[in-house]
């Protein structure tokens, strides 16, 4: 049975994670803080967001990082959302196997950011829990 996905709930996550697939270094702290804040404001756990990245965002956007002159400033949000929804609605079990393999090969492309995003996410969560 297919998982029921609330696209409206997912959209902010998709848009935030799309920054990981821009053809630029995310050196500015605000990029990673924006991603961490978006995750912390969502109903998803950090691990769930990593799965959303792997199975929904990565298949649609990773090829931007392989182009010699990929998008480097920002993706059009409508294109991201429509592309991911189209991917989700059309994927087959074999597509998921392909994603597993391709992700294993290319996950290092933006893997360096995840530790920092998780650190910022935990910092945001702990400060919101303590009321600071």
Image (cartoon, rainbow, N blue to C red):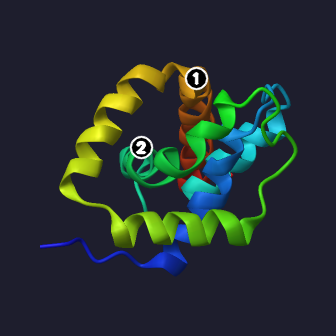
Mark 1 or 2 closer to N-term? 2
- Mark 1, Cα crowd under 10 Å, few <14 / some 14-19 / many 20+, is some
Q: CA distance from mark 1 to mark 2?
A: 12 Å
Instruction: Give the secondary structure at mark 2.
Output: helix
Q: Position of residue 67 (x, y in %)?
A: 71, 31
Q: Left or right: where does residue 118 sit relative to residue 66?
A: left
Q: Left or right: where does residue 126 sit relative to residue 66?
A: left
Above or below: residue 52 compared with residue 12: above
Above or below: residue 78 compared with residue 39: below
Q: Residue at x 59, y 72 (%)?
A: 82
- Mark 2, Cα crowd under 10 Å, few <14 / some 14-19 / many 20+, is some
Label number found at residue 54:
2
- To which quarter of the image does residue 1 belong? bottom left
- To which quarter of the image does residue 92 belong? bottom left
- Direction left: furthest residue: 1
Q: Is residue 1 visible?
A: yes
Q: Left or right: where does residue 52 sit relative to residue 31?
A: left
Q: Position of residue 63 (x, y in %)?
A: 60, 38
Above or below: residue 28 compared with residue 121: above
Label number found at residue 101:
none
Instruction: Give the secondary structure at mark 1.
Output: helix
Q: Are marks 1 and 2 in contact (CB under 8 Å)?
A: no
Q: Residue at x 48, y 77 (%)?
A: 7
- To which quarter of the image does residue 101 belong? top left
Q: Nearer the viewer, residue 44 or 93?
A: 93
Q: Position of residue 122 (x, y in %)?
A: 53, 39
Q: Residue at x 65, y 28 (%)?
A: 66
Label number found at residue 109:
1
Above or below: residue 25 compared with residue 89: above
Q: Residue at x 44, y 55 (%)?
A: 56
Q: Is residue 41 visible?
A: no
Q: Nearer the viewer, residue 109 or 10?
A: 109
């Amino acid at each position: 049975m297919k998982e029921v996905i609330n696209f409206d709930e997912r959209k902010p996550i998709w848009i935030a994670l799309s920054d990981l697939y821009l053809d630029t270094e995310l050196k500015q702290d605000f990029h990673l803080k924006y991603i961490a804040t978006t995750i912390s404001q969502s109903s998803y756990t950090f691990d769930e967001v990593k799965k959303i990245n792997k199975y929904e965002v990565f298949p649609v956007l990773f090829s931007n990082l392989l182009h010699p002159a990929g998008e480097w400033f920002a993706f059009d949000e409508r294109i991201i959302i429509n592309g991911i929804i189209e991917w989700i609605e059309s994927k087959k079990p074999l597509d998921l196997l392909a994603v597993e393999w391709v992700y294993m090969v290319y996950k290092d492309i933006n893997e360096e950011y995840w530790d920092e995003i998780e650190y910022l996410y935990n910092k945001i969560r702990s400060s919101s829990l303590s009321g600071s």
